[in-house]
Image: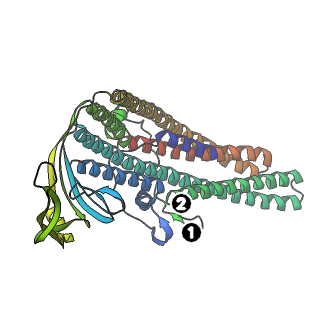
Amino acid sequence: MKKMSKKLLLVLGLSLTGMAGAMAQQQGNGSDQVWSLEEAVNYARANNLQVRRNVLNRDLSKVDLTQSKFGRLPSINGSSSYNFNYGTYIDPTTSDLRSEQSRTNNFALNGSVPLFMGFQQVNSIRQNELDLQAVEQDVLSAQNDITIQLVTSFLNVLFADELIKLSQQTRDLTQQQLDRTRILFDAGSVAENEVLDLESQLAADNLELINNENQRDISKLAIMQLLNLPASQEFEIEVPDIPDPDQNPVVVNGDQVYDVAVQTLPSIQAADLRVLSAAKGIDVAKGAYYPRLSLFAGLNTFYSSARDFRFPEEGSLQPTSIGFRDSEGTDPFIIYTPSTTFRRETYTYLDQLQDGVGKNFGFSLQVPILNGLQARSNVQRAKLQQQDAQINADIARNNLRQTIEQAYLDAVAAQRRYVAAKEQLRATEKNYSNAQLRLNAGVINTVDFNIVANTYRSAQSNLLQAKYEYTFKLKVLDFYQGEDISL
């Protein structure tokens, strides 16, 4: 049984990619702590941490896309400053050189609109749209990964339950034989080694039962961990009816499954979208070769505490200089001129702001000439990133083809193994029934009977293993074809 679990996990590791379409997210809580596969899948798709991380990445991509669209809007910024001046400074309101204490204040509002940016904005928006679509496919892929992991764990639990039932039946039969043999030994009809052989077989049966129970508990724990449920919580799964596999060979082939999967799997879609996104990245990088044209406009005003109004006033005659009536300078006289004084009035704060408004607008053109070959390097880097994205897409397709081919061959092999195991069980069951009759008649001893019984038990186990392995292989093929993989 442990070997079977490893095989299931191996196939799971090969097939953990997305499947087509997204199931609606609904939180199931398992009525009475009994979870059906559908409830578990719906709950895990909404609560599994890996899925939630992919949803968060999708939301971040939406923000990036929105921001790239807003980049085409005007950019408007306001500013203000308030200064205390000491000593010599240039008055911003009059551009005069002053040497006194004062306070100055200014306000400014500036805006710009990108008119042509080398098509970088348009290409960036398209690239972010492709990135968002790729991340949305990642969300679907993560949700479908959880689905197939849950299907695998559910099948492991069901397989372990079948083995537990078989182990219990085997142990009960061994216990009955041991009780009967002890009675015969007490009566002196059989040797002691007959009892010892059966006691050894009973211990082996108990060990096998415990191993199967442990494997069931481990598989249940795997389901609870996928659901982010504490291990201490009561947890049971709903047991569906798993029909015996159809003995007809698998009707689909690997090429048919691949043709459907490559068109529908979210992981392939995400890889292809990232190739397209990388191609847009080249266009974004090439945009740095083009000139950039912008329209700008501004509004500003100033205030200075040193600025005031001065009004002249007429006064009396005042001596201002000395003149001479003769050329020799021997007859001086005093020159009188009218005195003029100035009346100062305060230039209020609001008046200065209102009267000193300045406006401007214009165009800005930037022509790239030589910038350390940054544009060239960015274009080369973008081309390499596109090649890397293409290689990743090719690897995804190649892995998908190999996985489907392996899954198809495994399904065919499992179907053949199931048919053979069923024939083996039919043959060993007859031999086992005959051995029981001979043991009861005393024709054979317990050692010979145990050999036949172990062969019969092995055939039962092989049939169960082939049944669940074949069922899982078919589910894997259904998964790659986008079909329902519920039990």
Q: Where residue 463 appears, x then y in whole percent?
A: 56, 44
Q: Is 346 left, or right, of 142 in this rendering?
A: left
- Which of the two labelled residues, at mark 2 and mark 1, occupies the earlier sequence position? 2
Q: Find residue 222 and name its label.
A: none
Quadrant of the rendered structure where residue 396 is? top left
* 213 is higher (above) or lower (below) than 464: below
Q: Is 402 left, or right, of 221 in this rendering?
A: left
Q: Find residue 233 and name its label.
A: 1
The residue shown at (41%, 32%) is: 392
Q: Is 421 left, or right, of 21 in this rendering?
A: right
- The color scheme shown is rainbow
Query: Nearest the camera: 303 or 245?
Result: 303
Q: Where residue 332 appears, x then y in whole percent?
A: 15, 58
Which type of secondary structure does the marked residue at label 2 adopt?
helix
Quadrant of the rendered structure where residue 269 is? top left
Which type of secondary structure does the marked residue at label 1 adopt?
loop
The residue shown at (36%, 43%) is: 266
Q: CA distance from mark 2 to mark 1?
A: 9 Å
Q: Where residue 416 appears, x then y in whole percent?
A: 50, 35
Query: Nearest the camera: 391 or 72?
Result: 72
The residue pinned by badge 2 equals 224
Contact between labelled residues 1 and 2, with CB atoms less than 8 Å apart: yes
* 204 is higher (above) or lower (below) than 228: above
The residue shown at (21%, 70%) is: 349
Query: Nearest the camera: 416 or 31?
Result: 31
Is residue 165 at all visible to an observer of this figure?
no
Q: Amino acid at mark 1?
A: Gln
Q: Where residue 217 appears, x then y in whole percent?
A: 61, 58
Is residue 172 at all visible to an observer of this figure?
yes
Number of numbered discs visible in the structure rendering: 2
Q: Amino acid at mark 2?
A: Met
Label 2 Cα crowd, 10 Å radius (few <14 / some 14-19 / many 20+): many
